[in-house]
Image (tube, rainbow, N blue to C red):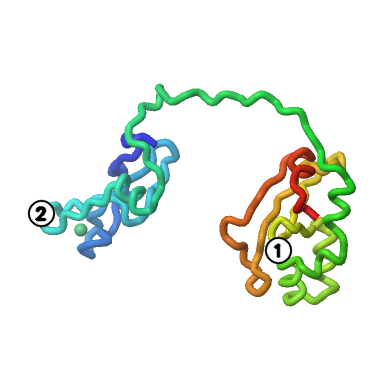
Amino acid sequence: MNEYRYTLEPYKGMSTRYHCPDCQEPEKTFSRYIDTETGEHIHPTVGKCNRESNCGYHFKPKQYFQNNNISFDATQPKALKPKFVTPPQKPVSYIPVDVFKASLSPTAYETNHFVKYLITLFGVEVASELVSRYFLATSKHWNGATVYWQIDTYGKIRTGKIMLYSPTTGKRIKNHTTIFIGCIHCLNNPNLS
Ligand SMILES: [Zn+2]
């Protein structure tokens, strides 16, 4: 992120001026910062009040990004940024069908948190339809975890994503996501049921 990327919006009539979030002056005394790459404003509070002596409000983009833990790596000029290099193509590997099938076993659903939650929401019938439509599977990776299989247009199983949900709220449990790419990782994981 380049500091010069963010600049106060140039004056183009009163539609480009705003009410100051600090002094609440009835006139539009506030200029907002824009991202020169996208032309978009940062945040309604990021800008500068022109009542310098009476108000003095000036909230800079850098401060805003720091406050919100958005990375702001100072002032690297654009031209020196490393060019994007296309990674070499990896050979495609697939997940074996029997691994896929085992994960869809109906007995596994008794422990699957996300399926339990779907049942409380929609009842068994709708929940089981959703399960088969989206290939929702179960993993022992974490107790009650759900697997989303990604199946390509040729019907091959490309990857699986394992996530853990709370059975009562249906919300994802933080830091409980694992992505398996290809069958090697999948077979190396004895916990995948
Ligand atoms: Zn002000």
Q: Is residue 68 left or right of residue 51?
A: right
Picture quadrant of residue 156: top right
Front-lying residue, 14 or 64: 64
Front-lying residue, 46 or 173: 173
Front-lying residue, 181 or 150: 181
User: What element does badge 1 sit on?
Assistant: loop
Q: Please give the name of the residue rendered at 72% of the width and 41% of the height, measured from the top-left corner.
A: 181
Instruction: Residue type at mark 2: give it.
Output: Ser
Compare marks 2 and 1 and give the one earlier in the sequence. 2
Q: Is residue 109 visible?
A: yes
Picture quadrant of residue 73: top left
Q: Is residue 25 visible?
A: no
Q: Which residue is mark 1?
A: 143
Q: Which mark is residue 53?
A: 2
Instruction: Tell me which image quadrant ligand 1 sits in.
Output: bottom left
- Which marked residue is nearer to the observer: mark 2 or mark 1? 1
Q: Which mark is residue 68?
A: none
Badge 2: residue crowd in 10 Å (few <14, some 14–19, many ≥20): few
Q: Please give the name of the residue rendered at 41% of the width and 41% of the height, measured from the top-left corner.
A: 39
Q: Residue furthest front?
A: 190
Instruction: Residue type at mark 1: give it.
Output: Asn
Q: Please give the name of the residue rendered at 57% of the width and 59% of the height, measured from the top-left corner.
A: 174
As measured in the structure, the alpha-carbon distance from the residue carrying label 2 to the one carrying label 1 is 61 Å
* Number of marks in the rendered image: 2
User: What element does badge 2 sit on?
Assistant: loop
Badge 1: residue crowd in 10 Å (few <14, some 14–19, many ≥20): few
Q: Position of residue 193 (x, y in %)?
A: 80, 55
Q: Position of residue 65 (x, y in %)?
A: 36, 48
Q: Position of residue 32 (x, y in %)?
A: 31, 49
Q: Is residue 84 above or below residue 19?
A: above
